[in-house]
Image: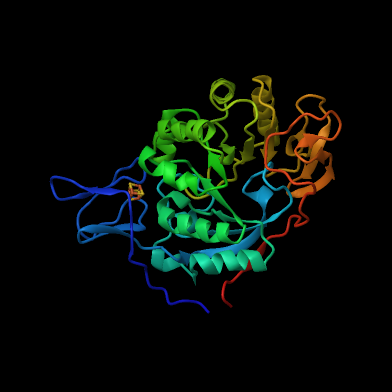
Amino acid sequence: MVAPLTHSDHPARWWTTMPDGRIKCRLCPRFCKLNDGQRGFCFVRQRDGDRIILTTYGRSSGFCVDPIEKKPLNHFLPGTAVLSFGTAGCNLGCRFCQNWDISKAHVWDRIADAASPEQIAQAAQRLGCRSVAFTYNDPVIFAEYAIDVAEACHALGIRAVAVTAGYITADARAEFYHHMDAANVDLKAFTEKFYHRLCFAQLAPVLETLVYLRRETNVWFEVTTLLIPGENDSDAELNRAAEWFAENLGPDVPWHFSAFHPDFKMLDTPPTPPATLARARQIARAKGLHHVYTGNVHDREGGSTWCPDCGRRLIERDWYVLGEWNLAGCRCAFCGREIAGRFEEKPGAWGARRMPVRLGV
Ligand code: SF4
């Protein structure tokens, strides 16, 4: 059963009334200041009298069962299925957005399915998914809904995964991540100039989120950088980013370099050559990082997991398809070296399938 396309007036959190009467949203570093009726940059948080409401609570742009590797997460329950969904809107304004039909959607255009947190958790269980992912658009902007879904999932033994740009304030960060089991965080580039010019955002809060995840939480997280020719793929920038990564996140946090394809407002930029992904991977590995991957391409070398000690292949991957499996629990089956991640005795068998689903139908 599909609910009517009405918006939700769920009370939003993380806001303060200012002396001049406006209400300041404190959820993300934009700190939108709203007069009555105004919406924030993300479009989905709106002032309604003396409060802010989340207009997309309980509403989704669609559900799909994906391989967990698609998030991408290569060290979190490999091979298992994840129930993925998003809502509408976004708190960044990336000109190269690869999901712009959702992230730039006005709520009324895109919100097709309605689902309570309990319905989502039950659907994940019924469909054999080990986790639910908040993805397609950034879950930070629907944090209240994402947290409630995560709680409902945990009650059924299902994990919660955030796919996010990490653009969240220190105020909201702790509670949001308290409810997440895993995350993939975009590090879109390593310059403020890029974030300012191409995302209408800032780099510094994203780095703070990454350091917070590493130092203050047990959330399993991996990092993704979409390499855009001529914008964030120079040797100098990649070297600086890799140095920062090694120093602040350590060698065991996986880093995915993925290929850009022309989209949204960057249709004139060419797609990323596979050689660029291989070069970025080489630079990051040369800085001591253990698990560096190439994405959105067929590359068995760059897609597979290798033991940092003995150099043997532990998990073979070709895009989202797993091949040989040489882990014994969370250790290398050859030399016994512990491998960072959340592994079980056997991989899942979901494969590369992508299965759209309608909840409640
Ligand atoms: S979450 Fe939305 S309303 Fe709040 S500060 Fe960010 S963009 Fe503005």
Comparing 289 with 231, the one in front is 289
Is the C terminus in the top left, top right, bottom left or bottom right quadrant?
bottom right
Task: Indicate whether 219 appears above or below 234.
Answer: below
Comparing 358 with 221, the one in front is 221
Task: Indicate whether 236 appears above or below 195.
Answer: above
Q: Position of residue 47 (x, y in %)?
A: 25, 58
Measuring 53% from the left and 54% from the top, which residue is drawn there? 136
Measuring 83% from the left and 43% from the top, which residue is drawn there? 325
Question: In the figure, residue 228 lies in which quadrant?
Answer: top right
Task: Indicate whether 271 appears above or below 118.
Answer: above
Measuring 43% from the left and 60% from the top, which residue is drawn there? 105
Horizontal side of 289 relative to 211 (left or right) equals right
Task: Indicate whether 121 appears above or below 192.
Answer: below
Which residue is most to the front?
155
Comparing 220 with 198, the one in front is 220
Q: Is residue 83 visible?
A: yes
Which residue is most to the left?
20
Q: Is residue 301 visible?
A: no
Q: Position of residue 46 (x, y in %)?
A: 29, 58
Question: In the figure, residue 286 lies in which quadrant?
Answer: top right
Q: Position of residue 188 (x, y in %)?
A: 51, 36
Measuring 69% from the left and 63% from the top, which residue is drawn there? 128
